Amino acid sequence: MPNLKDLVIIGDGFAAAVMAVHLLRRGIPRSSITVIGPGELGKGSAYNCASPFFRLNVREDLPIVFSEDPLHFARWAQQNINDAQAKTEAGYFYRRQDFGRYVSELITHESEPYQLEQIKAKVLSLSGTENNWQLELDNQSTLIAKQVIIAAGNPSPTWSCKVIHHQSASANSRSIENPWTGYFLEDIDAQENIILLGGGLTALDAINALEGRKHQGAIYVIGPRAIFPPAQALWQKQGQPVWPQKVSPATIVRFMRNYLPSAPTNSPEWQSAWEELRPNLNSLWQQFSPHQKKSLFKRLGWLWSLYRFRASPQTIAAYERLKEKNQIQFVTGRAKEIQCSASKVTAFLENGIEVNGDRILNCTGVAPDHLLHQLIESRLAIADPLSHSIAVDQNFRVLHLLGGQWNSLWMIGPGTMGSLGDVIAASAIAKQAEQLALELVQGV
Ligand SMILES: Cc1cc2nc3c(=O)[nH]c(=O)nc-3n(C[C@H](O)[C@H](O)[C@H](O)COP(=O)(O)OP(=O)(O)OC[C@H]3O[C@@H](n4cnc5c(N)ncnc54)[C@H](O)[C@@H]3O)c2cc1C
């Protein structure tokens, strides 16, 4: 007879931890909650990093876990983090590993004097029906849960093109499929020429870490555009935009364009206006049809990612230093194949360009999620409007094929973006956890 659980949270990252914290704070007994995830609860893909050069991309007052105490992390950081490099003109930007420590401490503190039950495994599949969910784990066990919250986060990157290793151990070590932890840095020689496939925040993390380790070799950044996100400035929301009554994707774009000043995107002025626009975007997004969401994302998705996810000032400063020494070179295009031999790695781009180096890092972002895919395949869930994840309603209930929603299966975190808008950052996820915990105790 499989194990019977009341409420299972799938995932071990920030979302799973803050979900558990808010459930406990709302009085859900510790004994009713089981977390399933392979690593230390609270760290996940984002904050379980070995490299001290990987920093939060937001200043200290922005990762808000408790809406009634927004400066909880900022205070904790002052007391518990020893990091002389954290302070910048735009605020304190702490190491991601220290933020992971904060989240782990939160959950330990909240469940004291005992630990929350955590099964150190991955959920391979989810089946069943209302209040009777069957979970198959990768440790060969199966369990039944009455309620399930999916908080599986950002699936680790996988190669977006074919990678061929010409049979040797050294050929294998030339390609780093998942650089998020930073463990790969130990193996890199300062003279190596490094290829970064992808030009977003993961590539910038790698650049900051390489610069911090006094890297001497060239760094080639392959991406569709030769541009990095700007550094965070010391922005402050001042005004509140008055949005038009009726919005379409086209009116949103026009309104935003008119609202943003002509100042540079790394200026406090521009970023303040951008941040003033953001709070309303999720509710506007939720009013759009799936077709409108898709077309807006297609038109503006890349621009959104560029300016929404700005980097820490330390990271951009490291990039600027390497740029000044001519160590960074952008190569525009998309890779179609990568070949690794014992002596080198070559990236073949669709436009015919070949880029040679000693090592290649996959900085292309999240991969598809197998568990969510399985839920769609088994018709327990439907795809979200962007076909990135599964669809949820405004109460985080997973939508199913019959046109309704489950009342005992929810999802929070980055996977809800296609349905609910911009929910990638820690504070947006914590807000979801707060709301869902309240709904669960109120039985909404
Ligand atoms: C590299 C990186 C850096 C980031 N930096 C910032 C930042 O500086 N500031 C910010 O606000 N946001 C940042 N983010 C955004 C991030 O989405 C959120 O801040 C937050 O960490 C997401 O938490 P999560 O728990 O949903 O996801 P994750 O951090 O991805 O954790 C999910 C965890 O669930 C586990 N899991 C997945 N599938 C299963 C399964 N089937 N069974 C069991 N366990 C499973 C995974 O192993 C993983 O450990 C970053 C994201 C990434 C990927």
Image (spheres, rainbow, N blue to C red):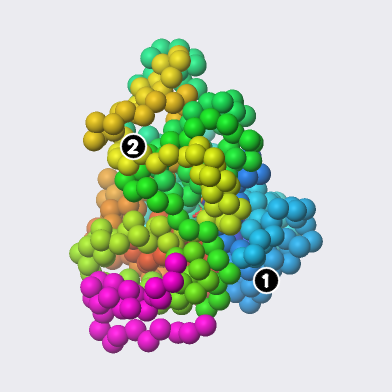
Where residue 235 sits, quadrant-wise, is bottom right
Residue beneath the point at 38% across and 66% down: 421
Q: Position of residue 243 (x, y in %)?
A: 34, 84
Name the one closer to the observer, 406 or 94: 94
Q: Residue 176, how many percent across, how many down?
A: 48, 31
Query: What distance separates the C-alpha of mark 1 from that of mark 2?
Result: 39 Å
Amino acid of disc 1: Leu
**Picture quarter containing residue 234?**
bottom right
Q: Nearer the viewer, residue 38 or 273?
A: 273
Quadrant in which the C terminus is drawn? bottom left
Q: Ligand 1: does it lie within 8 Å of the C-beta at label 1? A: no
Q: On the image, numbered disc 2 is attached to which residue?
A: 160
Residue 281 placement, left or right of 400: right
* Residue 198 spot, x, y in % from top left: 40, 42
- Residue 71 got which mark? 1
In the rendered image, which quarter is residue 20 located in? bottom right
One can see residue 35 in this view = no
Q: Secondary structure at mark 1?
A: loop
Disc 2 is placed on an element classified as: loop
Instruction: Write the start and end of the magenta stretch as one range.
Output: 238-264
Q: Residues within 10 Å of mark 2 (few under 14, many from 20)?
A: some
Q: Is mark 2 within 8 Å of ligand 1?
A: no
Q: Is residue 108 left or right of residue 434?
A: right
Q: Residue at x 35, y 60 (%)?
A: 303
Extreme left residue here? 291
